[in-house]
Amino acid sequence: MKNVFLILIIFLFPMISCKSQIISLEQAVIYEQQTGSIPQSTTYIKDVNNSLNKYIGIWKGDLNGKTYEFNFIKKENVGGFDVNWDFLVGRLKVSDSNGNITYDTSNEQDDLKTKFKGINFQSDLKAYKMYFVGNSVGCAEYGYVYLRIQPSTPLQMTILMLPDNDIVEEGKCPINFQPTIPYEQLIHLVKQ
């Protein structure tokens, strides 16, 4: 009887352990580069190395007469996908040169429908990639935002937005439209 029980444990343990695997954010990037996907046994993509922590907090900078204030928070073990993830959620407040707030998501919900949500690191692991959806979707105001912090200047960050699509719905976008986060322009930020 002991032998039967031992054999069952030997065969069942690998099955159980393979169904629940935690990998790091960095490992997920490497798997996706090498194979195009993460292992099916993955249940949680975790910020094991605390790589997201350096982005957390309030960051401010100016560009083209506007002041940008980004606030990043880390969400851990969030479901709603095939696997649970750790990622950043962003909040953005934009003020004009007179101090008037022109855009503000400070009070937005932290759910999966957030307008500024982290994806993962880009392939070289030097920038964290997020997806931003502005208020003017008819003007194609959505795309990827790259956060980059150089190790030598941990209190400075640059942000670059690349639009995901350039198709504008006819009649939905004003002639002088300016995106909330300017496209293809670096915004230099300082941690507050």
Image (spheres, rainbow, N blue to C red):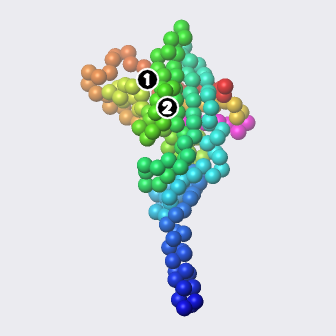
Q: Is residue 148 magenta?
A: yes
Q: Where in the figure is residue 146, as x and y percent of width and height?
A: 54, 36
Check disc 1 and report its element: helix, strand or loop.
Answer: loop
Q: Where in the figure is residue 101, as x and y percent of width and height?
A: 50, 15
Residue drawn at x 41%, y 38% is 113
Query: Residue beneath label 1, please?
Result: 179
- Residue placed farthest to the right in the image? 152
The answer to whether the residue labelled 2 contacts the one labelled 1, judged by CB atoms less than 8 Å apart, is yes
Residue drawn at x 46%, y 57% is 37
Instruction: Looking at the picture, tell me which residue is in the foreground, 166 or 128.
Output: 128
Where 116 sits versus 102, above or below? Answer: below
Instruction: Looking at the picture, tell me which residue is in the foreground, 14 or 131.
Output: 14
Check disc 2 and report its element: helix, strand or loop.
Answer: strand
Q: Where in the figure is residue 155, as x and y percent of width and height?
A: 69, 31
Which amino acid lies under the numbered mark 1 shown in the image of this protein?
Answer: Pro
Instruction: Looking at the picture, tell me which residue is in the foreground, 59 or 113.
Output: 113
Which amino acid lies under the numbered mark 2 shown in the image of this protein?
Answer: Met
- In the image, the segment drawn in magenta is 145-152
Question: Between disc 2 and disc 1, whose residue precedes?
Answer: 2
